[in-house]
């Protein structure tokens, strides 16, 4: 679907030919920078906006012209907007009241939803007396009470503090696992998207730039945009050249090291390339070890049990995750080494990925053969 808006300067294309299918019990995130069209996509699915072109189907039925309330979707937004003059149970039951469900049944189902959300001890309280977390749980209970066909959530956590965010994130996943309905979750936070989703759609400028499991997007990004948007600290880009190209293999020269990499079958002249290497595959060369590029250690920051070193090189800033035991001194001249089996090769003109290192491919293959490798701990 495509959604255009008329603006004083002409036409603003908010969503530009997005084509997506969400599976029965799938949790899918739309992620991308601010203004890329996530909310507009979701609002079109919800029926709050009408696409300029294209259609929305639910269970094969075209609902493009169906009113929002009749689509039987549950929505949750950043501003949770509980009715202040209604108790928790009345708030939770409200979607049923709108649908004309009799009071006794309404209350029974609201109590059930409240129990799932563990707010059954708060039923007679008013929103003003609730904590932020309790308000979010009430809002979640209200979304599940009418047994919707799918859940749509637009940055529901962005107003919460870090601790509450993690708690409500878990609640959303618990509810998803329990009700097992398709969920489309919008966020600008790639870490949030990766940790919660079965699949992630990375958007930019109204388009889907990448669609896949978190592992696929992280280890086998299809283009430079996805590679740089996914992952924190972000991927390093360094220059390189192709010295030979035979069949499905190219030989890449990375600062004097020749690396043989399998291509992914994308058309490319291999004349102008760029190489991406993630910070965890970038190292400070130890004594005697040969590095690929030299630089000055600018900054060392702590990230959990590791440190992030920023090195100023001829390639610009290179980010390296270093183990805790080693603390290089700031201002020191250091040598940087890349894991040559974990490189990504991008066409310099189109930004498309043309080859991925062996290690990256193994990461994804190992994961897909291990269904227990979920992301509940990510
Ligand atoms: P996101 O949710 O990814 O931040 P949006 O979907 O809200 O992005 O917006 C996508 C683009 O469409 C932005 O450039 C935004 O300014 C524009 N846009 C959204 N809604 C309207 C509107 N009602 N009128 C004009 N432009 C809009
Ligand atoms: Mg938005």
Image: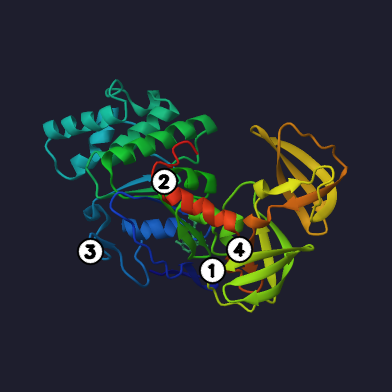
Callout 2 secondary element: loop
Mark 3 residue CB less than 8 A from any atom of ligand 1 = no
Residue at 63 percent of width and 67 percent of height = 346
Q: Residue 370 carries which label?
A: 2
Q: Residues under labels 1 and 2: Cα distance?
A: 23 Å
Tell which residue pokes out farthest to the right in this image: 332
**Which callout, 1 or 4, points at the residue further toward the start of the chain?**
4
Q: Position of residue 101 (x, y in %)?
A: 13, 40
- Alpha-carbon neighbours of circle 2 within 10 Å: few (<14), some, or many (≥20)? few
Separation (CA) of disc 3 from disc 4: 34 Å
In the image, 276: left or right of 86?
right
Q: Earlier in the sequence, mark 4 or mark 2?
A: 4
Rendered residue at 57%/65% (across/down): 223
Contact, mark 1 vs mark 3 (Cβ under 8 Å):
no
Q: Which of marks 3 and 2 is nearer the N terminus?
A: 3
**Residue 86 in view of the camera:** no
Front-lying residue, 192 or 137: 192
């Amino acid at each position: 679907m495509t959604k255009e808006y008329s603006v004083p300067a002409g036409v603003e294309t908010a969503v530009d030919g997005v084509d997506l299918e969400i599976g029965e019990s799938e949790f899918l995130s739309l992620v991308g920078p601010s203004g890329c069209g996530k909310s507009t996509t979701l609002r079109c699915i919800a029926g709050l906006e009408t696409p300029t072109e294209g259609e929305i189907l639910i269970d094969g039925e075209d609902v493009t012209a169906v009113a929002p309330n009749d689509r039987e979707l549950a929505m949750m937004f950043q501003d949770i907007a509980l009715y202040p003059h209604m108790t928790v149970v009345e708030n939770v039951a409200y979607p049923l009241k709108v649908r004309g469900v009799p009071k006794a049944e309404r209350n029974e189902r609201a109590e059930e939803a409240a129990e799932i959300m563990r707010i059954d001890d708060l039923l007679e309280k008013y929103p003003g007396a609730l904590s932020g977390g309790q308000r979010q749980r009430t809002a979640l209970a209200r979304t599940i009470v009418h047994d919707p066909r799918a859940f749509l959530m637009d940055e529901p956590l962005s107003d919460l503090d870090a601790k509450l965010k993690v708690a409500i994130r878990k609640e959303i996943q618990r509810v998803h696992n329990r009700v097992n309905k398709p969920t489309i979750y919008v966020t600008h936070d790639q870490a949030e998207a990766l940790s919660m989703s079965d699949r992630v759609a990375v958007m930019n400028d109204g388009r889907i730039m990448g669609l896949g499991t978190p592992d696929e997007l992280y280890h086998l990004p299809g283009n430079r945009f996805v590679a740089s948007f996914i992952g924190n600290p972000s991927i390093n880009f360094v220059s390189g050249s192709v010295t030979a190209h035979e069949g499905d293999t190219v030989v890449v020269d990375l600062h004097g090291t020749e690396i043989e990499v399998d291509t992914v079958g994308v058309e490319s002249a291999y004349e102008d390339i760029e190489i991406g290497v993630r910070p965890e595959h970038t190292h400070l060369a130890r004594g005697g070890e040969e590095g690929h590029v030299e630089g000055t250690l600018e900054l060392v920051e702590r990230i959990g049990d590791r440190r992030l070193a920023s090195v100023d090189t001829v390639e610009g800033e290179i980010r390296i995750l270093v183990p805790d035991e080693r603390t290089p001194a700031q201002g020191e001249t250091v040598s940087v080494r890349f894991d040559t089996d974990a490189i990504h090769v991008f066409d310099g003109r189109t930004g498309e990925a043309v080859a991925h290192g062996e290690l990256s491919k193994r990461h994804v293959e190992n994961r897909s053969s291990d269904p227990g490798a979920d992301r509940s701990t990510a």
